[in-house]
Amino acid sequence: MQASNLRVVDEDREATGLFVAAPAGREHPQPTGLARTEDVLRAAPRPPSAALPPPPSPPYFRLLAWARQHLPGYVLAACSLIGLVLAWHLATKYKLDFYIRFTNIPTPGEVMDKVAQVSQSKRFGTHVVLSLRRIFLGFALAGVLGIGLGLLIGRYKLMRSLFFPALEALRPIPAIAWVPISIMLWPDNEVSIVFITFIGAFFPILLNTVSGVQAVDGVLLRAGRCLGAKESALMWHVILPGAAPQIFTGLAVGMGVAWVSLIAAEMISGQFGIGYYTWEAYSLITYSEIVLGMITIGLLGLLCSGLIRLVGKAAMPWLAFSTQGGER
Amino acid sequence: MSDAPKAGRGHIAIRDLTVRYTQHGSSIDAVSNVSLDVQPGEFVSIIGPSGCGKSTLLNIVAGFLKPSDGKVLLDGAPIKGPGADRGVVFQQYSLFPWMSVRKNVEFGLKMQGVSANARTSAARTLLGLAGLLAFENHYPDQLSGGMKQRVGIVRALATSPQVMLMDEPFGALDSQTRVVMQEILTNMWQQLRLSVMFITHDIEEAVFLSDRVYVMTARPGRIKAEIPIPLPRPRTPDMTSSPTFLALVRQLKSLIREESLAAMGGELGARGLEGFDRSLAGEGMQAVL
């Protein structure tokens, strides 16, 4: 971020092509007054390459610079993770029991054995795939509805008055609390789990979209209108991209809540899925499977939010240069 | 060199305009009984103390606000709302941050349904004429303030408007950049001869750029004076030290000063303009305390 800011182009003083006409009376020497463009130009000649990145340095040098900048961070991250696993290993190996009981908790080694074991069969993969499908369906639905409704509610007072009270009444109810009703509402267990996932993701996406729309700079809307944009064009070309950074914040938060909701729903009413797998392991007293389930859930969540960050970065390339709010 | 504006379109006529708004139940006039003209091809500035309603005036012509009383006509037709026949340049940077410089310039043409190829080549031509082609693929956040405003001007020109409305376009720039931008703008105007309604509070800027300057009173804004600027065209920076220029600036300064004092009357209070009622002469604040 810093590096790109340093390269912000300041070419106010460059020659301005056709629009700088040579006015009459230039020959006369001037005592004081305003600086002429030409004077400024002569005083501060700009090499044409000023806006270009610096010339490439040898690869080993760049590698060294990269290492100096990033290596301490990576080393600390590795220490942090190793420390966690080590603590786990020691606590479980010596079966620590001081109010917290590690007596039944599997060791990291036992969990690793389980990983090797489940990778032999298809059963575990099926659970993962089913959970991912539910997340995808619920989240996609929440995205489409949340962004769509959010744009309308954020933009139009009427829509706001019409939809917001009902949505605000539903919002405080956690997705998990919907589980019993959801089972009754939907004909099929699969649909009801997708519905729970949807409920979890919907509200963060909706609320962030609404506030993103309301935060779009008014001068951009006015600029759009006096360039001839009608309402629909304004919505598509100005309001949607203007709200995009906050919409992506909503998507990232929504993805997190979607996973929470999915796992809870699977634990309560599922027959498949990684949440069900984890809960079933508890019922069947296969403790290393519990931990494997937990770790898998964590990794899948990480993967999904990473995916959203990646899509956000690709969809909003201008944020790389933004001086304000670029870090989202 | 003929300085007479070319016969053509782009005539702004404001007749007995009043803009009123209600605040906490009482109605306040932002602009009161204003009549003015911008002739086709004429550069007209409107200056006044802050809060005098000069931006309100521009927002009316741009179509963002509706008159409470009076008429606002563009080439004889009442203004109904915002439209691409009036190019607007704002004080705040108003380029769309998510579009490249070229896409920003293309935007107005895209709204008119011009095909992608045609508008790209139009935008590149315009950017080339303004010396900005090298930056066509930059995002606005990669540009300096002056560059952003130049792109803003080019974007407003792309739809071939009959008039340009400029609301303190250089107000956010540092004074060195502003001087250069003024020169670029006057040269640009020399080539294009559009009608320009230019809002500013910078007296030198108004005199340097304009054919005529309207001075507004403190709120409610009325027209206090109309000053023709007889400086020859094209304008050059060395004119800013000419006796005519300096006399005009002095005249305008005293007109504006009266209004600024009127506008600030209440807040100046008992101390008036004295600032501080005791000379400390190096004694430091302790001497008073």
Image (spheres, coloured by chain):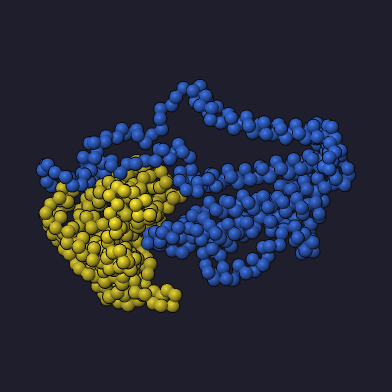
Chain colours: A blue, B yellow
A120 or B244, which is in the foreground? B244
Q: Residue at x 36, y 45 (%)?
A: B144
Residue B188 visible:
no
A277 left or right of A227?
Answer: right
Vertical placement of residue A17 versus B70, above or below: above
**How far across and down, in percent of the image, does residue A279 sit?**
82, 47
- The N terminus of chain B, quarter of image: bottom left
Residue B139, picture quadrant: top left
B288 left or right of A305?
Answer: left
Residue A190, picture quadrant: bottom right
**How far across and down, in percent of the image, does residue A16 sit?**
26, 44
A119 left or right of B123?
Answer: right
Vertical placement of residue A260 versus B162, above or below: above
**How far across and down, in percent of the image, does residue A303 sit?**
66, 42
Residue B253 visible:
yes
Q: Residue at x 38, y 67 (%)?
A: B64
Q: Residue at x 56, y 54 (%)?
A: A247
Residue A293, picture quadrant: top right
- The C terminus of chain B, quarter of image: bottom left
Number of marks in the rendered image: 0
A102 left or right of A8?
Answer: right
**How far across and down, in percent of the image, does residue B14 sit?**
27, 71
Q: Residue at x 68, y 45 (%)?
A: A301
